[in-house]
């Protein structure tokens, strides 16, 4: 598995392209903007884009879907039907999906938004805006913040300390660093 980071300058959001050389398939997480570099990474070695995974339905994480759908035919996974209407495979709760020859665990973590999902592939957690380096995601109420903190504690901070946090904005982190330095959990 190869993971490539792409920054969407317009929304300052992170997109991740994951390639599986074993099956020549790829997935993308939070396609905020599709760039020539992304397409080159897919096409250079003749990969098929199998799926797009959306952490939550905010424009800075979904703007590139229209472009992707014009070029490829990825299966779209999200917790909100509105992401791509009938093209969306709606996820609920927690589970595992196989895409591009990879087992992808998904976890519902409402708080930042009602449709927030976290995806785990290998030792990488793609957290969207649920957990950023050094802080829990923004919420619109004290209740939502408490719910989010409880969900992060039980579903993310319970992972191995060397699990890499790949957030929707900002730099990478690890579960161990978040347990030790994140002020929302001290």
Image (cartoon, helix red, strand yellow):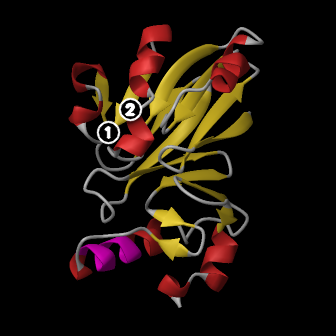
Structural distance between the alpha carbons of marks 1 and 2: 7 Å
Circle 2 SS class: strand
Up/down of 100 relative to 146, above or below: above
As for residue 134 lying within the magenta part, the answer is no
Residue 126's spot in the image, x, y percent? 55, 50
Mark 1 touches mark 2? (CB < 8 Å): yes
Residue 120 in percent (x, y) is at: 56, 48
Q: What is the crowding at mark 2: few (fewer than 14 residues within 10 Å), some, or many (at least 20)?
A: many
Name the residue: 69% across, 11% down.
Answer: 43
Q: Secondary structure at mark 1?
A: loop
Q: Which residues, given as a range, are shown in magenta?
A: 144-150
Count of numbered labels shown in the rendering: 2
**Residue found 28% across the figure and 44% down from its top:** 92
* Residue lying at 50% horizontally and 85% vertically, measured from the top left: 185
Mark found first going from the N terminus, 1 or 2: 2
Residues 65 and 98: in front is 65
Q: Residue 159 in the image: state x and y as whole percent.
A: 59, 65
Relative horizontal placement of residue 164, taking residue 149 as reference (left or right) = right
Q: Quadrant of residue 171?
A: bottom right
Could you tell me if residue 168 is visible in this image?
yes
Residue 91's disc number = 1
| Number of the label disc, if any, that sits on residue 77 | 2
Q: Is residue 60 above or below residue 107?
A: above
**On the rendered image, what quadrant is the N terminus found in?**
top right
């Amino acid at each position: 598995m190869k993971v490539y980071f792409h920054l969407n300058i317009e929304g300052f959001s992170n997109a991740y392209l994951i390639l599986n050389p074993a099956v020549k398939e790829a997935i993308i997480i939070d396609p905020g903007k599709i760039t020539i570099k992304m397409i080159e990474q897919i096409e250079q070695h003749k990969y098929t884009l199998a799926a797009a995974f959306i952490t939550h339905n905010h424009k800075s994480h979904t703007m590139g879907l229209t472009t992707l759908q014009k070029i490829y035919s990825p299966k779209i996974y999200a917790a909100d039907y509105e992401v791509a209407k009938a093209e969306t495979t709606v996820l609920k709760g927690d589970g595992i999906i196989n895409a591009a020859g990879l087992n992808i665990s998904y976890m519902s973590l409402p708080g930042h938004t009602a449709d927030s999902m976290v995806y785990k592939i290998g030792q990488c957690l793609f957290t969207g805006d649920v957990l950023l380096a050094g802080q829990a995601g923004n919420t619109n109420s004290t209740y939502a913040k408490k719910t989010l903190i409880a969900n992060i504690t039980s579903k993310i901070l319970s992972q191995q300390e060397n699990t890499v946090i790949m957030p929707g904005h900002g730099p990478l982190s690890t579960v161990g660093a978040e347990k030790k330095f994140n002020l929302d959990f001290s």
